[in-house]
Image (spheres, rainbow, N blue to C red):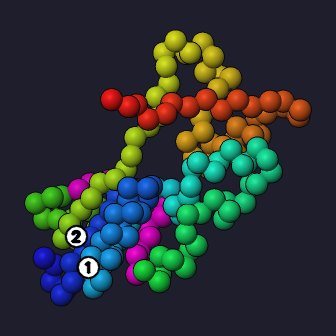
């Protein structure tokens, strides 16, 4: 436990897992300190709403899962546009890209995964735009010629 009276939970990743972990931690430990570190500039947003960009909704605020005030109300510190460059588990210290260090009591790495691109489509890569983030969805819309069509192809959850 840190020298402060309440534990400091640090979560690396601001997607679904990271944000909901922070919510559960806040509910189960109201006095704790919670910090989410993410390399994203945006707050947690609903990626399932990204196709709305093709219908003209481009304001990033319309995609947020929670308003910005939610984090301050819940006492969750968001460190956006921040890269973790080193984790020292023996001393419970994280080093950030700008050489700042953060001490933690408990660490959760919820940084997600990258999309899968089938090798058999490699010849068409220049024609295919990723759609895993708000920034990628905006770029895909900008690449679409006037009057052009977009097709959204994804991989659903595998079921046993």
Image position, residue 82 (x, y; %): 43, 60
The residue drawn where x is 75% and y is 40% is 141
Figure check: 136 above or below 78: above
Image position, residue 121 (x, y; %): 56, 15
- Mark nearest the camera among 1 and 2 is 1
The residue drawn where x is 24% and y is 62% is 107
Q: Is residue 93 left or right of residue 128?
A: left
- From the viewer's side, name the closer residue of 1 and 23: 23
SS label for mark 2: loop
| Residue 105 seen in render | yes
* Snapshot quadrant of residue 128: top right
The residue drawn where x is 55% and y is 15% is 122
Q: Is residue 89 left or right of residue 79?
A: left
Figure check: 122 above or below 152: above
CB under 8 Å between discs 1 and 2: no
Numbered mark located on residue 104 in the image: 2
The magenta stretch is 75-87
């Amino acid at each position: 436990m840190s020298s402060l009276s309440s534990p400091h939970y640090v979560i690396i990743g601001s997607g679904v897992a990271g944000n909901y972990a922070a919510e559960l931690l806040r509910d189960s430990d109201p006095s704790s300190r919670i910090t989410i570190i993410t390399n994203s500039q945006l707050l947690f947003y609903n990626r399932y709403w990204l196709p709305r960009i093709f219908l003209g909704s481009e304001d990033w605020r319309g995609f947020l899962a929670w308003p910005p005030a939610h984090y301050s109300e819940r006492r969750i510190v968001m460190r956006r546009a921040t890269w973790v460059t080193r984790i020292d588990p023996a001393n419970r210290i994280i080093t950030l890209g700008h050489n700042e260090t953060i001490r933690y009591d408990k660490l959760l790495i919820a940084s997600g995964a990258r999309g899968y691109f089938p090798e058999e489509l490699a010849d068409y890569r220049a024609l295919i735009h990723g759609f895993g983030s708000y920034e990628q969805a905006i770029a895909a819309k900008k690449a679409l010629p006037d009057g052009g069509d977009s097709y959204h192809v994804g991989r659903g959850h595998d079921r046993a």
